[in-house]
């Protein structure tokens, strides 16, 4: 992948997504990654799915 391609993807991602950092206790990332993979998801996809499922009916005022 060339520099221009990476720059284009970074530019798109900056426009299309918000970024958050999650800090986990040592060793938990690998565990959560394995669980996500067992469900056919990436770790990011798994986290997003959990958040959506657990905030589906929430209303912020």
Image (cartoon, grey):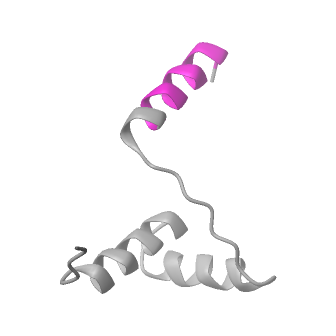
Give the number of callouts: 0
Residue at left offset 41%, top offset 45%? 17
Q: Position of residue 46 (x, y in %)?
A: 44, 74
- Comparing 45 with 21, the one in front is 21
**Left or right: 11 with respect to 15?**
right
**Left or right: 21 with respect to 10?**
right
Residue at left offset 20%, top offset 78%? 59
**Left or right: 39 with respect to 60?**
right
Any magenta on residue 55?
Answer: no
Q: Position of residue 47 (x, y in %)?
A: 46, 73
Residue at left offset 52%, top offset 52%? 19
Classify residue 41 by image quadrant.
bottom left
Q: Position of residue 60 (x, y in %)?
A: 25, 74
User: Residue placed farthest to the right in the image?
Assistant: 26
Vertically, is 20 above or below 18?
below
Quadrant position of the N terminus in the picture = top right
Query: Magenta stretch?
Result: 2-13
Vertically, is 50 above or below 17?
below
Quadrant position of the C terminus in the picture = bottom left
**What main secondary structure does the magenta stretch of the protein show?**
helix
Classify residue 33 by image quadrant.
bottom right
- Comparing 40 with 45, the one in front is 45
- Comparing 55 with 32, the one in front is 55
Classify residue 32 by image quadrant.
bottom right
Residue at left offset 63%, top offset 69%? 22
**Left or right: 21 with respect to 45?**
right
User: Residue placed farthest to the top in the image?
Assistant: 4
């Amino acid at each position: 992948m060339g520099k221009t391609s990476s720059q284009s993807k970074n530019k798109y991602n900056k426009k299309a997504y918000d970024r958050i950092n999650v800090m986990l206790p040592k060793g938990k990332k690998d565990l959560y990654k394995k669980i996500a993979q067992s469900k056919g998801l990436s770790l990011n996809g798994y986290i997003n799915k959990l958040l959506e499922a657990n905030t589906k009916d929430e209303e912020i005022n």
